[in-house]
Image (cartoon, rainbow, N blue to C red):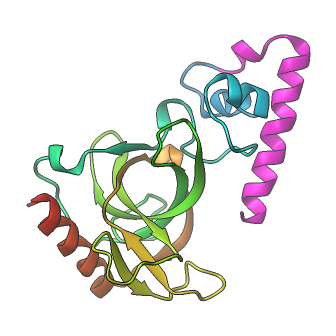
Amino acid sequence: MSDTGRFLTALFRAIGQVFKSSGSSGSAGSAGSAGGRAARGATTADASRRGFRGTDTISPGQTGAAATTEVDPRSLGRVRLGYAPSRDGAPDPGEIVWTWVPFEEHDGRGKDRPVVVVAAGGDDRFLAVQLTSKGRPGDRDYLELGAGEWDAEGRPSWVRIDRVFLVHAAGMRREAASLDEARYRIVAEALAGRYGWR
C-alpha cells in the first residue's frame, strides 16, 4: 500500500473512533458524502458488521455508493473500447488505477488492487480488469503484459480477462500510470472477442 493509502487508512480510523466514542457514527456526514461513508466504515468492527471481513484497511471502492462491483461482461451489450489516457484529473481508458477488488467467493472480502480501465460509461463509472503479478502461462483467462511503471518492483504483469469490474470515479485511486496503446489494444481485442463487445 502507498504512503498515501496508509495515511488515509490511519485518518479514517481516527475519524471512526471519534464518531464511535461520541455515539454519532451513524450521522457522520450526509448520505452522499464520501467522507461520511469512509468514517462509517473505518474500523474493523464496523466493516465486520457490514459483512466485510479479511481486511482492516479502507480502500477506495470498498463500500458505499462508489463500491467496486463485478459485472457479467456478456450482459453489457455495446461497450465502447478506445485508448484515451489523459492527465486531466479524470480516469480514462488505458489508465491503471487502484480500487477494492472483491474476492471471487463474493463473501464480502477483497483486496486493494491495480486494475486497467478499459471503457468509460455513464454516471462516472468505468469498466476495468484486474492486473496481477501472478500469471498463468497458457491460461486463456490471463494475458501477459510484461513490466511497466505501475509496478515499483519491475515485475512482469498479467491481466485477468475472466472478471470485469464496474468502478466508480470516487472509488478509485489514480497513480499516474497507464498502458501503452499497443498493450491496451491487446487487452481490448481479447475482451471484445471473448464477450462480443462491439
Residue at the spot 17% in from the left edge and 59% down from the top edge? 80
What residue sits 81% from the left and 53% below the top?
A: 7
Image quarter where the C terminus lies is bottom left
Residue 154 on the magenta span: no
* Quarter location, residue 179: bottom left
Percent position (x, y) of residue 73? 23, 50
The reply to whether residue 104 is in sight is yes
Q: Is residue 16 magenta?
A: yes
Is residue 43 at least partly visible in the picture?
no
Tell me if 49 is positioned left or right of 43 in this view: left
Majority SS type along the magenta span: helix
In this view, 27 is above or below 115: above
Instruction: Please tell me whether residue 23 is drawn above or below residue 127 in the rendered image.
Output: above
Where residue 81 appears, as percent x and y from the top left, is 20, 64
* Coordinates of residue 79 in the picture (x, y in percent): 16, 55
Q: Residue 184 placed where, x, y %?
A: 30, 78
Residue 73 vs 91, above or below: the answer is: above
Q: Is residue 36 left or right of residue 108?
A: right
Picture quarter with the N terminus: bottom right
Query: Which quadrant holds residue 190?
Result: bottom left
